[in-house]
Image: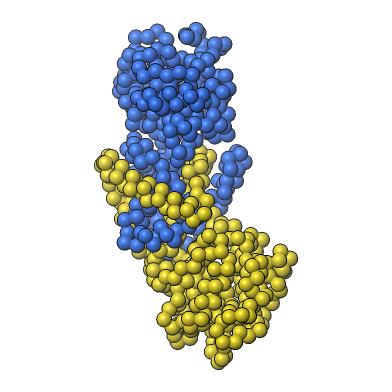
Chain colours: A blue, B yellow
Amino acid sequence: MALSGAEGATARPTVVVLGLGLIGGSLAAALRGNGFAAACIGWGHREASLRRGVELGVIDRYTLVLEDAVDAADILVIATPTLIAEEMLERILPRLRDRPRPPVITDVASVKGSLQRTAERVWGAMPPRLVLGHPIAGSERSGVEASNAELFARHRVILTPVAANEPSAVELVRAMWASTGAEVVDMAVADHDRVLAATSHLPHVLAYALVDALARSDASDDIFRFAAGGFRDFTRIASSDPVMWRDIAIANRPALLQSMDLFAAHLDELRAAIEAGDGDALLQTFSRAKAARDEFAALLAARGQSVT
Amino acid sequence: MALSGAEGATARPTVVVLGLGLIGGSLAAALRGNGFAAACIGWGHREASLRRGVELGVIDRYTLVLEDAVDAADILVIATPTLIAEEMLERILPRLRDRPRPPVITDVASVKGSLQRTAERVWGAMPPRLVLGHPIAGSERSGVEASNAELFARHRVILTPVAANEPSAVELVRAMWASTGAEVVDMAVADHDRVLAATSHLPHVLAYALVDALARSDASDDIFRFAAGGFRDFTRIASSDPVMWRDIAIANRPALLQSMDLFAAHLDELRAAIEAGDGDALLQTFSRAKAARDEFAALLAARGQSVT
């Protein structure tokens, strides 16, 4: 199927999802369920997952041949982890160069700068029909079995369009995400990577560092025996996929390091206040943090995302 | 009411709770509900809270006069925040010195070393009928309105008895907590403070430091707009009471500083690995942390505490 003229005017697009994990599977399930897509096709290496995707009604069909997947697509969603997404661009972009009307390509990776650099290197500039995006939704669960057509409802999806993008390509990706119930917002690539470093990548690194530090300490048995609810919530994100987070940490290295350094400086200040027994400084910091966190929780609640 | 001979053989004790917040209120509610206590009496400064406690059925009655509270008690539970608990010991212990049979005293504070030092200073040694304890249960909610007779069920309560304690006093406090459905375990004071620093006090400091660092950054508006579920869980404990956590940080200063330094050293290692792009080191750390956290979550689940 080929779209003629401006995207999405009438014909429903065929959506091809590369990588049928939690995010790719949930997107396909949403786009099949709401009628946005004429068909959802899966591509990946593990045929068992793809077959399971068909069984679960997440996709209409699948292929193991990347060329067939690209040929079938009006919209190509790279839904692999971050570093694999870079590889996918390296494999896909060269074969699209001579096509008069390549598919619109988008992705779901947690880091945008590294993908933009890869695309620019491979294509010579930002490809006009590549619109980078990032749904701010997820779960520590993974795999196609965890697919959930409602995963994006009331959640944000950030698109990072650039001047080189075809407006119709941007609008098609925006319409795709809007159809899932997500709120789509635009951001500059560098802002996205900075904000995600602060709110997601840094917390993951802190949670991994804490749990690993405790697990390696002499008293680790007692420590885990007597930890309770607060510790459970604080460390939940340390149950996330280590491969995915290794890749994110490396892909977003500059912004993550900056974020870590800002945090370390604050922690040093707090350490000094604790050592000095400076109760006023501690109370000021803790109170400011509580106020900001309460405000954030109210904001999430107002958006309809459950808060505890 | 006075208990004759060994505690708790037949007569039910009158329990006096000093400070009717979440923990004190929940304990009183549990001990009234399960029939362990002949009566539960509240003491505090804020009469409105105490009156509300009676209305809610949390306590039988209350007094604003500390002497009356102490006189009425077979078991005196100091359920005030950590630093206030030190003050309470300073006020109560001197007037018990000449009594042939003072009440058994226990507490619920998050730090045990600071209370032990206070008691030893005031009494000259550890009072035989003072049995320090700490229920590992709580909530970011606070106040008598949040009282919940089931709060301690399937949770741990740590007692830190010392050689100077009367065995019958230790057993009475143990029986009191066991009646609430808690699992009571003994630990050395220093071990308690080290384990709690690692699993509770350090995570709270990290959460406060992170939220405050982000709130004070230039991009704070965007940061909180685009934060999602992982950030919400990671920072939930930063909504805890700042005064309580200031007090805990100061009371457990030595163990907390040690814990912070261990963590900072690990974070430095991780930072170096990220800067060097050392994917293997990151994967190793993240995988070890995930394994430890998954094991911990399974342990909590086996204990009947819900896990996400």
Taking depth in this image into account, of A285 and A247 the one nearest to the observer is A247
Residue B208: x and y in percent read 47, 55
Vertical relation: B99 (above or below) A272: below
A203 horizontally vs B90: left or right: left
Q: Quadrant of residue A161?
A: top left
Vertical relation: A183 (above or below) A43: below
Taking depth in this image into account, of B215 and B93 the one nearest to the observer is B93
Q: Residue at x 61, y 80 (%)?
A: B10
Residue B177: x and y in percent read 55, 69
**Can residue B144 be seen?**
yes
A188 horizontally vs B242: left or right: left
Which residue is farthest front?
B10
Residue A13: x and y in percent read 51, 15
Q: Residue at x 33, y 14 (%)?
A: A95
Tally of marks: 0
Q: Residue at x 47, y 53 (%)?
A: B302
Which residue is farthest right?
B55
Residue A307: x and y in percent read 57, 46
Q: Quadrant of residue A142?
A: top left
Taking depth in this image into account, of A66 and A288 the one nearest to the observer is A66
**Can residue B91 be seen?**
no
Q: Residue at x 44, y 61 (%)?
A: A226
B259 horizontally vs B204: left or right: left
